[in-house]
Image (cartoon, rainbow, N blue to C red):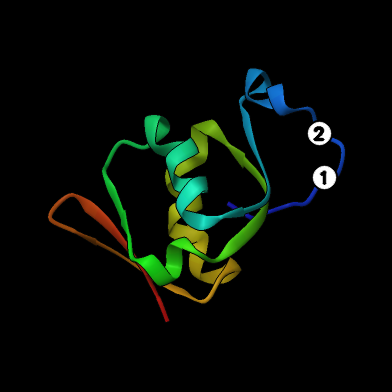
Amino acid sequence: AALHVRPGVPAASWRQGVVTLDDVPLGEAIERLRRYLPRPVDVDARAAALRLSGQVRIAQAEDFVRALPSAAPVRVRLEAGRWSVAAR
């Protein structure tokens, strides 16, 4: 799930199935997406502080987690049914 920056998108974009991130910490982004993710996500403190902007389709929230290493200096692993996100 590529991150595409779109300035001026209304906060209620979730009504169109999108969560908009505007320079938010990764930890906050994961919190916003948690209800749409089928598995738990653990984010270490260094990774949680990294800032992101873009849009994530709610239906592709897990693809966003998988794609994080292409957008931020993090490692992502899926083990025992849980995602783990750690700073590189």
Query: Measured from the top left, where is residue 58 in percent x and y?
Result: 53, 32
Mark 2, Cα crowd under 10 Å, few <14 / some 14-19 / many 20+, is few
Residue most extreme to the top:
15
Q: What label does residue 9 carry, if any?
A: 2
In the depicted view, which residue is nearer to us: 61 or 25? 25
Q: Furthest residue to the right? A: 8
Taking the view exactly as shown, the residue that stands out farthest to the left is 80
Q: Is residue 12 rendered to the left or right of residue 68? A: right
Counting from the top left corner in percent of width and height, residue 64 is at: 51, 51
- The residue shown at (44%, 54%) is 65
Residue at 81%, 33% in the rendered image: 9
Residue 30 % position (x, y) = 45, 46
Residue 2 lies in quadrant:
bottom right
Q: Which mark is residue 20?
A: none
The x, y position of residue 21, in whole percent, is 65, 45
Q: Is residue 2 left or right of residue 40?
A: right
Asked if disc 1 and disc 2 are in contact, CB closer than 8 Å, the reply is yes
The structure residue drawn at horizontal position 33% and vertical position 65%, both measured from the top left corner, is 44
Q: Which residue is mark 1?
A: 6
Asked whether, in this view, residue 40 is left or right of residue 28, the answer is: left
Q: Is residue 70 above or below residue 8?
A: below
Look at label 1 and name its amino acid. Arg
Query: The residue tagged with tag 1: helix, strand or loop?
Result: loop
Element at label 2: loop
Residue 61's place in the image compared with 27, above or below, is above
Q: Is residue 50 above or below residue 17?
A: below
Q: In what quadrant of the picture does the C terminus appear? A: bottom left
Q: Amino acid at mark 2?
A: Val
Q: Residues within 10 Å of mark 1 (few under 14, many from 20)?
A: few
User: Residue at the location (50% across, 32% down)?
Assistant: 59
Farthest residue in the bottom direction? 88
Calculate the distance from the C-alpha at mark 1 to the C-alpha at mark 2.
6 Å
